[in-house]
Amino acid sequence: MTLEIIRDALAWCAVINIGLLLWWFLFFTLAHDWMYRFHRKWFKLSPDTFDAVHYAGMALFKTGILLLNLVPYFSLRIIG
């Protein structure tokens, strides 16, 4: 596997993951009440706790994208 293939794979992984994060944010923002009602059937969460869980999940996902996709991609761009 060449350096270029790894760089391309990391770039596409980042694009896909950022798209998923954007979809999650838009769905959470535009369909918040529906999502809360849907999840309330299984979990006893207040709206504030529901928001905090999603905010923390998005922050963790964004950190994962940064550390696992973007940092290796840019380091490979620098060395190669």
Image: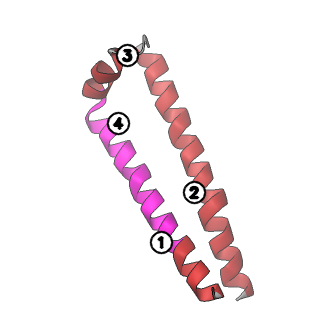
Q: What residue type is labelled 4?
A: Phe
Picture coordinates of residue 4, whole percent (x, y): 59, 87
Highlighted range, magenta: 11-32
- Please tell me which residue is depicted at 30% across the width and 28% down the height of the picture: 35
Give the Cα distance between marks 2 and 1: 11 Å
User: Residue tagged by mark 3?
Assistant: 42
- Residue carrying label 2: 65
Which residue lies under the disc numbered 1? 12
Give the spatial CA distance, label 3 vs label 1.
35 Å
N-term mark: 4 or 1:
1
Local crowd at mark 4 within 10 Å, few (<14), some, or many (≥20)? some
Question: How far apart are labels 4 and 1 at the CA level?
Answer: 24 Å
**If you read the primary sequence from the N terminus, does the residue marked by circle 4 or circle 3 appear first?**
4
Residue 66, disc: none
Q: Position of residue 68 (x, y in %)?
A: 64, 60
In the image: residue 44, left or right of residue 36 = right
Mainly helix, strand or loop, the magenta region?
helix
- Answer whether labels 2 and 1 touch (C-beta < 8 Å): no
- The answer to if 6 sits in the magenta stretch is no
Residue 80: name its quadrant: bottom right
Provide the secondary structure element on which disc 1 rests: helix
Secondary element at image label 2: helix
Closer to us: 48 or 13: 13
Kind of residue at badge 3: Trp
Marks 3 and 1, the one that precedes in the sequence: 1
